[in-house]
Amino acid sequence: LLVTSFCKAAKMAAAVAESIAPRYSHMLAPLELRCGLTLANRVIMGSMHTGLEEAHNGSLHKMAAFYEARAKGGCGLIVTGGIAPSREGWVSPFAAKLTTQSEVEPHREVTAAVHQYDSKILMQILHSGRYGYHPLNVAPSPIKAPIGWFTPRALSSADVSRTIDDYARSATLAKDAGYDGVEIMGSEGYLINQFIASRTNKRTDEWGGSFENRSRFATEIVKRTRAAVGDDFAIMFRLSMLDLVEGGSSWEETVMLAKALEDEGVDIINTGIGWHEARIPTIATSVPRGAFSWVTRKLKEEGVLLHTPLCTTNRINLPETAESILRQGDADLISMVGGRRQRERIFFCCNPRLFAHALPMPQIGAAVSGRPRDCEQGRRWSRGGDQRLHRLQPGLPRPHLQNDDSQLPC
């Protein structure tokens, strides 16, 4: 009886998969990366801070179970929450880091859980820079973040080189732990972004001044990381394509950096939208679905990337949205976060902070741009944010996408 039931369930699952596949042919298409890694489909579970990255009693079993469930659901590529490459890079005191061999073993439980299924997993290396909520934080220049608690210590030239080596060592340890690659977090206003932007980089040495000098930190990280891990390990770089703050990168600078990153050997460039200190909503429910995919498309249309697929992100909550973006050629991959599956339709949490309110401890939460406490306030933030966006970068086209979140509960 048990065997019969299992066979019936398998046939039903196969029938559902067969009926869904034609509708999402672009989303479910495999993709081979330059490093030789093949992704089963174009769906990436993007990085978010889950509160599960810190080992408890020497174990990451909760984190393993969390990502195993996503792998079991068929996600092609999973990216963990941010892991610091040093204590200075902590997001908060005693936050997750991967700096020593002794910290590798708990991560093997995570990668083994995911690799039971046809899914790959990258570890995100995130150095918070001046965003760190601790007195050890560092930055290219001693400028306190408007959302920070401490004024950072400016890195010396020797410190900069050591920090680059920290990234490469953390990636090497991630490879030892069984990860298929790493995502280097270069957007959202974290340390790499702080070096790239004149807003936060006031240096006069080889790491500041001209754009070539300011972007050297990013490209040198990729260069040393690739040398450390070899050619058979995936490197995804999250590039800030819209900073949405004064003193951010120009579009021409973004294009130049994207090409330089490809030349240094990245396998995927992921789209980053907005710094955390930006006053413009980027993932709140007030933002239309897929509202920033045009940014990724604009970089594709520049024609400078010959071998590197682009991933788009932010407010892509349904497979219909993802399929449409891929079909019209805006991107090669889609990053989606959170959610649950109900029959064939996938519902993704529009406001990840809801998790934080639902749980006794702040686990499985994520930073949310803007502060929409209810739908109407969210819409006001959207209107104001749209005006601020076009004051900062008036040449950017406005997204003309229907926001159907009015039909969803807050």
Image: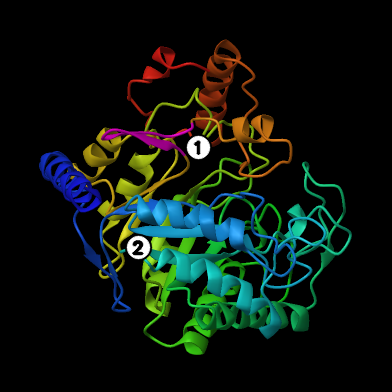
> What crowding class fits label 2: few (fewer than 14 Cα within 10 Å), some (14-19), or many (20 or more)?
many
Number of the label disc, if any, that sits on residue 357: none
Which quarter of the picture shows residue 224?
A: bottom right
Quote the CA–CA distance across marks 2 and 1: 38 Å
**Residue type marked 2:** Ser
* Magenta highlight range: 339-349
Q: Judging from the image, what secondary structure is the residue with disc 1 in? A: loop
In the displayed structure, does residue 74 sit left or right of residue 286?
Answer: left
> What crowding class fits label 1: few (fewer than 14 Cα within 10 Å), some (14-19), or many (20 or more)?
some
Which quarter of the picture shows residue 308?
A: bottom left
Front disc: 2 or 1: 2
**Residue type marked 1:** Gln
Q: Nearer the viewer, residue 35 or 192?
A: 35
Residue occupying the point 71% across, 55% down: 200
Residue placed under numbered mark 1 in the picture: 393
Residue placed under numbered mark 2 in the picture: 119
Lower position in the chain sequence, tag 2 or tag 1: 2
Q: Nearer the viewer, residue 226 or 55?
A: 55
Residue occupying the point 67% across, 50% down: 51
What kind of colouring is applied to the model shown?
A: rainbow
Residue occupying the point 51% across, 34% down: 283
